[in-house]
Image (cartoon, grey):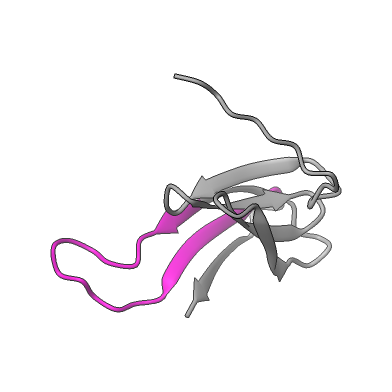
Amino acid sequence: MRLKISLLKEPKHQELVSCVGWTTAEELYSCSDDHQIVKWNLLTSETTQIVKLPDDIYPIDFHWFPKSLGVKKQTQAESFVLTSSDDFSNVISFR
């Protein structure tokens, strides 16, 4: 097994990245102390800023809830729970 590392010429986060979450093998999301949630496409190296959080929110962790549950493919919003250092929790839905 080999670990492939690639560095971007320009960083997407300006502060410490506190958590990452994979949604698929090709896609992950990262949260940082710069109050951004960024979506990464690992195949194309494309990044997209998804959310700019308020300045008083410092993310600690988040958990993804899948789009489909069980054997049936149900259409629903992709959701996750974000926790922060001030004990404030958000549930954000992507449609």
> Does residue 67 belong to the magenta stretch?
yes
Going 41% across and 76% down the picture, which residue do you hit? 77
Horizontally, is 71 left or right of 54 in the view?
left
**In this view, 56 is above or below 11:** below
Going 72% across and 42% down the picture, which residue do you hit? 17
- Find residue 8 and report its horizontal and vertical position in percent: 78, 43
Horizontally, is 94 left or right of 11 in the view?
left
> Does residue 70 belong to the magenta stretch?
yes
- Residue 82 location, quadrant: bottom right
Q: Nearer the viewer, residue 58 or 37?
A: 37
Going 64% across and 50% down the picture, which residue do you hit? 30
Residue projecting furthest to the top: 1
**In this view, 90 is above or below 20:** below
**In this view, 72 is above or below 15:** below
Which quarter of the image is occupied by the N terminus?
top left
- Find residue 55 and report its horizontal and vertical position in percent: 83, 63
Residue projecting furthest to the left: 71
- Find residue 79 and report its horizontal and vertical position in percent: 45, 67
Horizontally, is 41 left or right of 18 in the view?
left
Total numbered labels placed on residues in the image: 0
The boundaries of the magenta stretch are: 63-85
Going 34% across and 77% down the picture, which residue do you hit? 76
